[in-house]
Image (cartoon, rainbow, N blue to C red):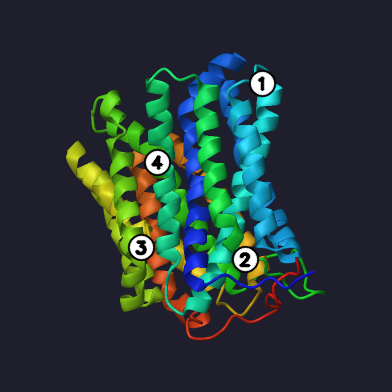
Amino acid sequence: MTLHTPSPPRAQQHSTRAAFFIPGFAAAAWAPIVPFAKAHAGLDEATLGLVLLCLGTGALLSMPLAGALSARQGFRKVLLSSVLLTCATLPLLTLIGSPWLLGAVLFLFGASIGAMDCTINMQAVMVEREIGRPMMSGFHAFYSIGGLVGAACMTAALSAGIAPWAASLLVVAVTLVLSAVASPHWRTDRVAHGAPLLAWPRGAVVVIGVQCFILFLAEGSVLDWSAVFLHQVRGLEASRAGVGFTAFSLTMTFARLLGDGLVQRLGRPRAVMLGGTCACIGFLIVTAMPAWESAVFGYALVGLGCANIVPVMFSLAGRQKTMPESLAIPAITTLGYAGVLTGPALIGLLARATSLAIAFLAVALALLCVACSMRWAGTEADVMHHPAAGPQPTDHAHE
């Protein structure tokens, strides 16, 4: 057996960007084929909603497991296993005619995406810490770019008359090629023997996790409710109502590409306070101004404000002193995804009891709480100039 020599820092950075691109690309490629899968499996809307829950459930359950496996087996093995599972399940989603089988494969597909999401954030924390400057926003930007490219490519392929199964194989081919190029530079770090593999979040990790829950809830509310709001409340034609989410996605991607420099100049606590305030103002504009153009501008501000907060939270998760990152990051990732899954439902319940505008105001208030909480979190979890405490990854794995 030979000792694995770490890749050069620049190669690690590029491979981490590729690792963020892949799950965004694959998950977005699924979205355009949902109607085909629905028709092929003979599902109605209610049954489809239940089947789609399998995807989120798989993602949520896989995250703590991915953290534990990464701690023992190294990031590379978990990332490669996740990629292979993604590539195996995506084409099957276009061919299955049974609702039960579709739900089972969606569970596995979601588990592969969730495991990769968790593991890439753990790798990104280590790469960022070793380089000594903020890089997390740029890494997360490639997840957004992957989503835009995946949705666009799959939509173009389907529009050109390519069968869904064949289009999904093209996505698989791109994913495998990208993984083959990047995987030699994915890290193989493991935690010290005897360190716990699972633990309940505590201290600063709970604070960071709750903030991620709110941020993912806000993002989920734009994804699932912006078109409904623009159509039903602002009177925009249904065919054009997706412009709100488009504005949100574009400003988020743009802000993340520029986010590392911004965070470095402002500092992490101030970047979160300004971002949370900007997103809060965006939701206030959405609800307070009657013109649909103003609402679209508001959604753009929400994307601009939310863009760099989650990357900052993952950076802080790798630098807090309460828990080792192999436990903290899976916990925070799981809490964030819980916000994506439960947030739209909570907004729907609040909207039914009051109105959709009031539900958005509640999200605005929650974002303002995120901005204000950094005054406390900045002293409790502001460890930006200190190494993370707790059991740390040991030497690179032997191969």
Tell me residue 368's x, y (percent): 37, 62
Q: Position of residue 393 (x, y in %)?
A: 68, 75
Instruction: Name above or below for residue 70 compared with residue 111.
Output: below
Which one is closest to the eye, mark 2 or mark 1? 2
Q: Residue 149 shows which numbered tag?
A: 4
Note whether residue 372 is visible.
yes
Tag in front: 3 or 1:
1
Q: CA distance from mark 4 to mark 1?
A: 29 Å
Circle 3 sits on which residue? 276
Which of the pair 363/91 is nearer the observer?
91
Question: How many other residues sit within 10 Å of disc 2, few (<14), some (14-19) or many (≥20)?
Answer: many
Residue 68 in percent (x, y) is at 73, 61
Tell me: residue 18, above or below residue 291.
below
Q: Secondary structure at mark 3?
A: helix
Q: Earlier in the sequence, mark 2 or mark 1?
A: 1
Q: Disc 3 and disc 4: Cα gap in Å?
A: 27 Å
Are the residues flagged by discs 2 and 1 in contact, CB closer than 8 Å?
A: no
Residue that carries the numbered disc 2 in the rendered image: 187
- Give yes or no for contact between labels 2 and 3 (Cβ–Cβ under 8 Å): no
